Amino acid sequence: MRAAGIEAFGGDVHMLGLAAPRSPAPDEVVIAVRAAGVGNWDEIVRTGDWDVGRRPPLVLGVEAAGVIEAVGAEVSDLTTGDEVLTHPLPLRDQGAWAEWLVAPAALVARKPAAVSWKTAGAFPVPALTADQALTDAAPTPAGSWVLVNGGGGVTGGLAAQLAVARDAIVVATAGPRSSERVRGYGVHLVFDYHDPDWPARVRDATPDRRGVDAAVNTARGGGATAMRAVADGGRLATITGDPPPPERGVKVADVYVRADGARLAALAEAFAAGLLGLEAGASLPLHEAAAALEDAVAGKAVGATVLTLWPQVSAEKP
Ligand SMILES: NC(=O)c1ccc[n+]([C@@H]2O[C@H](COP(=O)([O-])OP(=O)(O)OC[C@H]3O[C@@H](n4cnc5c(N)ncnc54)[C@H](OP(=O)(O)O)[C@@H]3O)[C@@H](O)[C@H]2O)c1
């Protein structure tokens, strides 16, 4: 099958010619991939700093959407032809930048018809991460002040929308390109992160200038800056691997996405119901995987990037 990945950790991304995946184990499905997301996190897999459950030769990609092609003997709630999306870690076979993907059925969610392939392929990691980080930072968000640093990004945008949906008073940072869109999420106030004093301005906006009750940081290297806007005894969750040392009684969480099929299904339904939106980015053929990853790492990719894998061209099928 056609696939894109690496021969060694730290190696260049290129096309890999691999055998079609094995038959599914009793609790697995095989998905014919239509779209697979590309994010800065794939670089962490490429360098070997995120253990996704297998070693090179490794097909990269940790999220995808597609059509079920084969089901294991014990899978009762999914069948061939079902349209699904998944963040299937730890990998049972290979990664998602490939024509076929083996996934545990428990980590697979049905794709609502209203969600496009492109969105579905890019949705699982940012949506689960935003949901999990927000829950860590603000377990009971209704009525509390919640900051999302990086509201203009894919994951930050989802975190802001989820916080609004949970009745928090949401403030966010965004650049000029994104501020109008972020305001459209129902965010109370948007601050330009280019202003070095934005954390103080956030504090000034809160009652008694105490700061926000909770913050989700989605901006690279932004954990310590976001901390400055948090009230004493508040909570901060950062997804960029930069947890600042705790201070003033602020509880800090270093969040890494956890695979969760049931939660992914609920988030996809929320998207289909119009409660969440995702800024679409580039849609590229599989053989442009290396360039897509470079753009994500360089911060050049705007919106959610996907590799498209349809129609499958390999003659050999699982
Ligand atoms: N821990 C995990 O499991 C996990 C999961 C997913 C993502 N991540 C990480 O989270 C980060 C965001 O990922 P993503 O894919 O959502 O990002 P993204 O969509 O590529 O976000 C980029 C956006 O961030 C905004 N931004 C840039 N610099 C900023 C700053 N200094 N302050 C505030 N906002 C800034 C810009 O928006 P404007 O348009 O507003 O300028 C930019 O368009 C990445 O580092 C990624 O690796 C971690």
Image (spheres, rainbow, N blue to C red):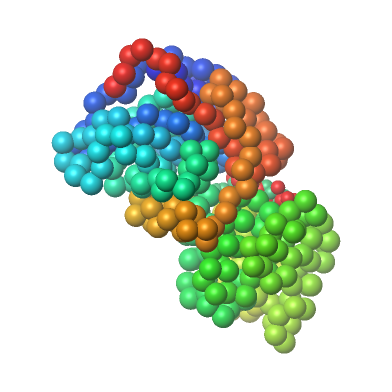
**Outermost residue, left direction?**
73
* Residue drawn at 52 percent across, 58 percent down: 274
Query: 159 or 90, which is in the foreground?
Result: 159
Compared with residue 231, is residue 246 higher up or lower down, i.e. above or below?
Answer: above
Residue at the spot x=36%, y=46% of the render? 110
Above or below: residue 78 compared with residue 251: above
In the image, is 148 to the left or to the right of 260? Answer: right
- What is the tally of numbered marks visible in this picture? 0
Q: Vertical placement of 295 versus 130: above or below?
A: above
Could you say where residue 270 lies in the image, as x and y percent from the top left? 46, 58
Q: Position of residue 272 (x, y in %)?
A: 47, 54
Give percent across and percent down for residue 89. Answer: 38, 42
Q: Quadrant of residue 281?
A: top right
Quadrant of residue 43 in the image? top right
Q: Can you say which quadrant of the picture contains the N terminus?
A: top left
Left or right side of 101 for 190: right
**Residue found at x 33% / y 14%:** 316
**Residue 123 in the image: x percent, y percent?**
50, 46
Q: Of all residues shown, which one is farthest toward the front?
A: 114
Q: Give the quarter of the figure containing the C terminus.
A: top left
Q: Is residue 166 visible?
A: yes
Whether residue 90 sits left or right of residue 194 in the image: it is left
Residue drawn 56% across and 24% down?
285
Q: Is residue 119 left or right of residue 221?
A: left
| Residue nearest the observer in this picture, 117 or 262 | 117
Residue 297 shows in the view: no
